[in-house]
Amino acid sequence: MLSDMEEGKKGEMFIPDIDEKTLSTLIKYVYTDQLEMAEDQDLQMMIHAADKYQLPGLITLVCNQMREMDLKGERSE
């Protein structure tokens, strides 16, 4: 794991509890205010990331998208 000093020098960050796909989606949301999730996006990870970075609007969008999926029958649990 990189120290804060090394992260700054290398221009890299390591966030151990969020995968790359989720982080990419999160960054796009922060910059565009639009949610664009991949079909195989880990929804629990998205909720975790939105909660971690205090983005209640993102939590709402993810939950709405989950409801739409359930209504269309595309995802069953």
Image: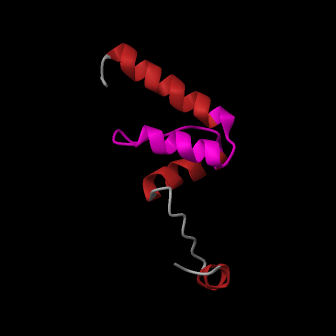
Place residue 73 in its image quadrant: top left
Looking at the rendering, the stretch of residues picked out in magenta corresponds to 31-57
Q: Residue at x 40, y 43 (%)?
A: 42
Closest to the observer, 26 or 32? 26
Place residue 33 in its image quadrant: top right
Q: Residue at x 44, y 38 (%)?
A: 43
Residue 8 in the image: state x and y as whole percent.
Answer: 66, 80
Q: Residue furthest top?
A: 71
Q: Considering the image in quadrants, where does the C terminus appear?
A: top left
Residue 40 in the image: state x and y as whole percent.
Answer: 34, 42
Closest to the observer, 57 or 4? 4
Can residue 33 be seen in the rendering of this structure? yes
Residue 12 in the image: state x and y as whole percent.
Answer: 57, 75
Colouring convention used in this rendered image of the protein: secondary structure
Place residue 61 in its image quadrant: top right
Q: Does the magenta segment cover residue 67?
A: no
Q: Does the magenta segment cover residue 32?
A: yes
**Does 74 sit left or right of 46 as displayed?**
left
